[in-house]
Amino acid sequence: MAVMAEVSTTTGAALRSPASPAPAPVKEGDADKLRFIEEMTSDVDAVQERVLAEILARNADTEYLTNCGLAGATDRATFRAKVPMATYEDLQPYIRRIADGDRSPILSGHPVSEFLTSSGTSAGERKLMPTIEDELNRRQLLYSLQMPVMNLYVPGMDKGKALHFLFVKSETRTPGGLAARPVLTSYYKSNHFKNRPFDAYNNYTSPTAAILCADAFQSMYAQMVCGLVQRHDVLRVGAVFASGLLRAIRFLQLNWEQLAADVETGALTPRVTDPSVREAVAGILRPDPELAAVIRAECSSGDWAGIITRIWPSTKYLDVIVTGAMAQYIPTLKYYSGGLPMACTMYASSECYFGLNLRPMCDPSEVSYTLMPNMCYFEFLPMDAAASGGDASQLVDLARVELGREYELVISTYAGLNRYRVGDVLQVTGFHNSAPQFRFVRRKNVLLSIESDKTDEAELQRAVERASALLRPHGATVVEYTSQAYTKSIPGHYVIYWELLLAKISASADGEAVDRETLDQCCLQMEEALNSVYRQSRVADGSIGPLEIRVVRPGTFEELMDYAISRGASINQYKVPRCVTFPPIIELLDSRVVSSHFSPALPHWTPGQRNDD
Ligand code: AMP
């Protein structure tokens, strides 16, 4: 025992940065986890070599690797020589066959247990990522490393609870009968989560039944009311992504009166109908007029600044990802939390869970993730090579990336993705032992994102084309357009700026020749043309608001070009940006708006995957 304590304290010291405040003593239960991180990061190349050999051995007889001509080889040199880099579209024929029920070892030597539906899309539909049973253990292992790291920085997290808004989404079955659902839905519905042993560091205020309720309103309501009742126990407030936490705050803004009434009487609103949720909440909700008065006092003033710490006064930090596309929400979260630290603890995807932030209390701008070399085989395509297409010979191993350089992430997984391009761009910021640490720079090709939706330039172009067809009978065309992810309101929404050319002589200079109704319909047509993740967020989750078209005065885009040129852009190379984020440009556009229009209805969306392509 004494030896363990000694080892663990040293391990904790290794993980803590030199600038960290007073060291917290390492808990006995954490020592193994911290030592595991140290072991995994001390010789990443050796771990990666072993992981690759394991992956290739278990998948040796798959059709994919056989077609590559690997002939059972498990060494790096043969792998590098024979296996090409692949995109989702390259793998789609194989994936389609698995989805249709072919149980032969196509990509994975282990049976595919289900498909994880990525928020990345291909031809407008969620990508289907095959997964296998034991992948859950690897995910679980990564989750189990989070709190031991956090405990090095924030003591006492076992003395209370986490108000973590967790949700499941709808799931479908492929024609071959495999479940297709998001990775977190799969995790929350797994026995790993449902039957987890009590853990004082991951003690949620939300009953599992509320998390597992597929109805977004009922689930959120139940989680919120339970969070309110246990307000003094709450030590951290979170959601997976920043947008999810902001939705919860918006929910409180819209529903605090009913929530307070429920707390006052101890009776849950009849709007929550799910019997298992009602039963779970009944075990927690008690009449508490005093608490109801606090909720009313805090929520009725109309002042929402610092609401999180006013309602949950013991909150030490927000547990929420604010890196990547979520960075746009940092100012809003600061406002609602009164500037609480935001901990981005993990970097993960449907394809594979990747790594951890070993300094979880650092500023969001400094977050780096340490890729854990046991999760999969990592390779990196230098961004200069990626820009010109890139080929497998340019891939660099995890142990050979260079400080400061940007790379596209390429992975080979136990579940049978080989040299798969994830589409994330990462920059090397430092090392923990021999393990490189990466800043998440961006997702390739994403122009607009409010929540987990990812809209690229081609999708936006198609949507504009489809919508502008409605203008033709009016003799109008869209001459230029750009866009903005508008996140000042919750939920956020897409704003598309249109400059119209009006052929008819009768048209007034400000674009009024097209009636309001047509332009409203254009908004809806654009939404109909956007990918299924966007439409699901609009329809099922309500996490994206109606799309808005702002018609700007003729000549506005010329002004935009003049502005860019005045700031040094080359007149020959100038291209209209299809998305704008720079505040002066947005101000310029907004000052030229002649009319704005919102989508009058929800676009179509059904849970199933489209099978006609
Ligand atoms: P999905 O395939 O829907 O599970 O989404 C996975 C993607 O979400 C990743 O490939 C990243 O682009 C993004 N993502 C996941 N974790 C983070 C993070 N911690 N910071 C920034 N982006 C993230």
Image: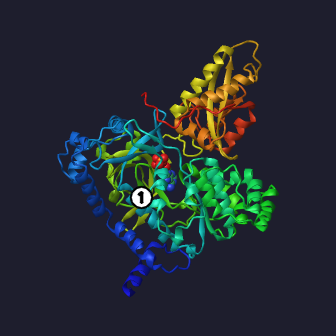
* Residue 467: quadrant of the picture: top right
Location of the C terminus by quadrant is top left
x 55%, y 74%: residue: 158
Please give the name of the residue rendered at 28% of the width and 63% of the height, measured from the top-left corner.
46
- Most extreme residue toward the bottom is 2
Amino acid beneath label 1? Arg
Give the colour scheme of this rendering: rainbow
**x then y, percent, for residue 63:** 24, 41
In-front residue for pair 336/401:
336
Residue 437 shows in the view: no
Residue 566, percent across and down? 64, 38
Most foreground residue, 175 or 342: 175
Residue at image position (42%, 56%) is 354
**Residue 506 image offset from top left, x and y in percent:** 76, 13
Farthest top residue in view: 505
Q: How many marks?
A: 1
Query: Observer-nearest residue: 436 or 405?
Result: 436
Residue 420 location (% of width, % of height): 35, 45
Q: Is residue 3 visible?
A: yes
Label 1's element? helix
Identify whether 601 is placed above or below 501: below
Residue that numbered label 1 is attached to: 139
How packed mark 1 is, by other alpha carbons closer than 10 Å (few <14, some 14-19, many 20 or more), is some
Which quarter of the picture shows residue 6? bottom left
